[in-house]
């Protein structure tokens, strides 16, 4: 390595290639040779680069830490409202789970990104109105519109959160893509925190059992719900303070999972043609099919948002293009099955909700596939593919709002 470095002292590209081939050996050899070098801007740059250390202080901004603590206390209080006020768990949690996750994040974003007061007040008012509305809906466990409203409220609150995220100096599309990328990073970081929390919980419960104390019931009733509700908030804070934590992990996961999901989806479609299950008559099969569709859409969105700034490689575009085409096929099957059931049995809240969301996703996928096809042919820049996703966020928000606020009244809370 020393000889190779000496041969490439004036070649910036050659030094970079050596560094990328074996970073540890390059650093050791360079530091041994550096005292004998005649200093040049290039060599001085490498000396600084190899010895630069980033010391991340997670508690440097005391005001933000205290704000985070206050938000965490508020979140814990919301989670424990049924315990404090003797409210039925089955009544409270389905209606308010979205607020437990997204209200803390919205408050943190409002503090961190210094959104305008108009936006802050608007989003806060939206959350208050939504909370009052969803908790005033009649209690009916058999109501389809109630279940749909609770599920789509989560999507609605998530979409609303996008208005508080990001630097106002960024363009509208950049903010939306940064928001989508943040959500991918948030999922990765949250998964790591949940895994670590699960290990810690197992050790804690085991240690208490060794000395004769059974804390299982108390721990899972009081500690775990609060801990889980705080995971997204803590993950968000860690990502903002130290973005390098997941900057390389998330794109790697996206690159690994895209081809795996492509193969899985192709195999599933082939196997489905030999299956005795009928998508048009089996309601549970259709439900699983739609869950598969949403999952694959999420993978495509995640992969594109992760590569937005750097652009997507041509191979990755090909993989995502094939995945999008297969997803369009899946969506078409699901859409035809829904239309068949509507023709046979009439409209219901569930069928109309699934029909609307599938139509929205189909249009999104078709436009996305067309943009990727243009990119493959060389007519469009690859970095612009992801903007199709950003343009559809308001449409998903509008559809979620429609299901939450209009469906229960339209179908008379049935």
Image (tube, rainbow, N blue to C red):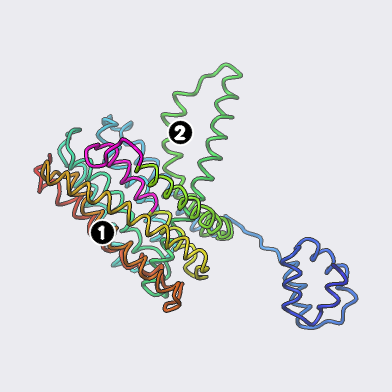
Q: Residue at x 57, y 23 (%)?
A: 208
Provide residue 307's location: percent of width, then percent of height.
49, 65
* Callout 1 secondary element: helix
Q: Is residue 400 left or right of residue 200?
A: left
Q: Is residue 318 left or right of residue 157?
A: right
Say few, some or many: other residues with alpha carbon within 10 Å of mark 1 (under 14 / 14 to 19 / 20 or more). Answer: some
Type of secondary structure dominating the magenta stretch: helix
Q: Of discs 1 and 2, which sits in the foreground?
A: 1
Q: The residue tagged with tag 2: helix, strand or loop?
A: helix
Q: Quadrant of the N terminus?
A: bottom right
Residue 256, x across and y down, in percent: 54, 54
Position of residue 172 relative to residue 265, above or below, is below
Residue most toward the right? 36
Residue shown at the point (12%, 46%) measured from the top left: 343
Tag 2 residue: 223
CB atoms at circles 1 and 2 under 8 Å apart? no
Real-space Cα separation, disc 1 to disc 2, in angstroms: 40 Å
Disc on res. 360? 1
367 on left or right of 241: left
| Residue nearest the observer in this picture, 65 or 273 | 273
Residue 32 higher or lower than 207, as above or below: below
Can you name the residue that lies furthest to the front here? Answer: 274
Residue 24 at x, y percent in the picture: 78, 60
Q: Categorize mark 2 by other alpha carbons within 10 Å: few (<14), some (14-19), many (20+).
A: few
- Specify start and end residues of the magenta stretch as a single range: 274-296
């Amino acid at each position: 390595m020393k000889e190779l470095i000496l041969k490439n002292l004036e070649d910036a590209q050659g030094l970079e290639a050596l560094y990328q081939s074996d970073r540890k050996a390059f650093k050791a050899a360079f530091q041994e040779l550096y005292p004998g070098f005649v200093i040049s801007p290039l060599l001085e740059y490498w000396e600084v680069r190899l010895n630069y250390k980033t010391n991340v202080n997670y508690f440097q901004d005391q005001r933000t830490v205290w704000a985070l603590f206050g938000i965490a206390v508020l979140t814990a209080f919301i989670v424990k409202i049924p315990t404090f006020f003797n409210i039925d768990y089955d009544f409270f949690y389905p209606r308010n789970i979205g607020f437990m996750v997204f209200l803390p994040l919205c408050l943190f974003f409002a503090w961190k990104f210094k959104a305008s007061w108009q936006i802050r007040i608007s989003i806060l008012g939206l959350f208050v109105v939504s909370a009052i509305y969803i908790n005033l809906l009649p209690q009916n466990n058999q109501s389809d519109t109630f279940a749909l409203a609770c599920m789509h409220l989560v999507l609605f609150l998530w979409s609303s959160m996008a208005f508080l995220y990001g630097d106002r100096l960024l363009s509208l599309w950049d903010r939306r893509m940064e928001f989508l990328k943040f959500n991918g990073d948030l999922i990765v970081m949250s998964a790591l925190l949940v895994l670590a929390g699960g290990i810690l919980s197992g050790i804690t419960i085991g240690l208490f059992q060794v000395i004769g104390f059974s804390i299982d019931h108390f721990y899972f009733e009081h500690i775990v719900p609060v801990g889980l509700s705080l995971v997204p908030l803590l993950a968000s804070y860690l990502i903002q303070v130290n973005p390098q934590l997941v900057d390389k992990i998330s794109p790697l996961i996206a690159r690994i999972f895209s081809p795996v999901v492509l193969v899985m989806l192709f195999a599933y479609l082939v196997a489905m043609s030999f299956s005795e299950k009928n998508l048009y008559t089996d309601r549970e099969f259709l439900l699983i099919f739609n869950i598969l569709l949403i999952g694959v859409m999420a993978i495509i969105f995640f992969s594109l948002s992760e590569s937005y700034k750097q652009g997507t490689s041509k191979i990755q575009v090909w993989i995502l293009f094939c995945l999008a085409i297969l997803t369009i096929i899946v969506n078409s099957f699901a859409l035809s099955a829904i239309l068949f059931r509507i023709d046979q049995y009439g409209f219901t809240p569930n069928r109309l909700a699934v029909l609307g969301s599938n139509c929205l996703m189909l249009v999104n996928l078709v436009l996305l596939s067309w943009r990727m096809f243009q990119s493959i042919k060389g007519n469009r820049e690859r970095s612009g593919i992801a903007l199709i996703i950003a343009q559809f966020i308001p449409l998903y928000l509008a559809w979620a709002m429609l299901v939450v606020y209009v469906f229960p009244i339209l179908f008379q809370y049935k």
